[in-house]
Amino acid sequence: MTDQIDIALAFDDNFWAPAYATMRSICISTQRRKDLVFHLLHFPLSDEHRADLEKITSEYGAKLNFYPLESQPDFLALVQNLPTSARWPAIVYARLALTKLLPADISRVIYLDTDVLVRWPIEKLYETDLAGADLGAVKEALSPFIPLRTDIRQNADIFDGAEPYFNSGVLLIDLVAWRRIDFPAEIAALASSGVLSRLYFDQDMLNLIFRGRWAQLEWRWNTIDAHPAHEALDPAILHFTYATKPWALRAGIMRSTAYARWYRHVMTNELFYRFARHRWKRWWLKRLGIGR
């Protein structure tokens, strides 16, 4: 196994602070900080926000590679006809383009959503034996509700509720295997079959593409819907999938979200409150109809 630990994150300029917190939590939790290479797949970043992210290098010695997706034709072509929403913008499909975006000499990468907090040495996940599988992932805590949707029967012609189904927020990816897959062709096949519009964005797509070809990881590597009760179970990666996020300022946040106080100090107080002001300003601009 190489000394380099490759990790990919995808986000836009409104989530630069959670991306920073995710990276910093990784750096805090490992002694192999200078082996870390973060591949940041992003839409346009302000100079101020990019400078915040680059502090990971100055503080820990980790390397950052930036990939501006607005100038990546392969990514733009891939996502142009895929379903999106306000909650699930086009950036969520960046993980489907990793083989086109990352250097060809990388054989393995960890993909992380930016609403996660890492507590265990990330190399323990990176060095997991996939036993020939194309990726490793954790079973989705809300399966089979997510794939089968309403009344756990809506998509019964697409998914089997008894079949393992994974959450796509934490993935250990064999890029050598992924490079043999024609993702545009796989997506085109889903579209031609008429099921694409019925899918739960990238997560359903990945579960269909890698059906029977993924290894189930221990739940600790993706502790979904992380609540305070999970703290006693020593989770490795907390995934804040619930509506209550650790960066929220609402009363009671410390009692409803795992490691909320720890998260704030990982993000750092200065950035935590600057991110709060950014979100507050964005909310008001949307309310006034002059922002996105």
Image: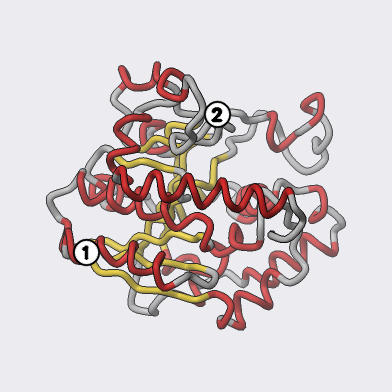
Residue at (56% x, 64% y) in the render: 94
Q: Is residue 206 left or right of residue 275?
A: right
Q: Quadrant of the N terminus?
A: bottom left
Q: Amino acid at mark 2?
A: Ala
**Element type at marker 1?**
loop
Residue at (63% x, 34% y) in the render: 163
**Element type at marker 2?**
loop
In the picture, the disc for residue 273 is: none
Q: Nearer the viewer, residue 273 or 136?
A: 273
Q: Is residue 7 left or right of residue 137?
A: left
- Rendering coords of residue 125 (x, y %): 30, 46
Identify whether 220 is placed above or below 199.
above
Identify whether 20 is placed above or below 237.
below
- Rendering coords of residue 143 (x, y %): 63, 30
Residue at (67% x, 72% y) in the render: 78
- Rendering coords of residue 92 (x, y %): 59, 57
Which quarter of the figure has residue 166? top right
Q: Nearer the viewer, residue 13 or 241?
A: 13
- Which numbered disc, 1 or 2, marks the residue closer to the eye? 1
Residue at (53% x, 57% y) in the render: 14
Identify whether 282 is placed above or below 72.
above
In the picture, the disc for residue 62 is: 1
In the picture, the disc for residue 141 is: 2
Crowding near the residue tagged with mark 1, few <14, some 14–19, many ≥20 C-alpha atoms within 10 Å: many
Crowding near the residue tagged with mark 2, few <14, some 14–19, many ≥20 C-alpha atoms within 10 Å: some
Q: Amino acid at mark 1?
A: Ala
Q: Is residue 210 left or right of residue 105?
A: right
- Rendering coords of residue 58 (x, y %): 18, 65
For the view shown, which residue lies furthest in the left direction? 31
Which quarter of the figure has residue 265? top left
Could you tell me how far apart the alpha carbons at marks 1 and 2 are, in whole angstroms? 32 Å
Q: Nearer the viewer, residue 281 or 151?
A: 281
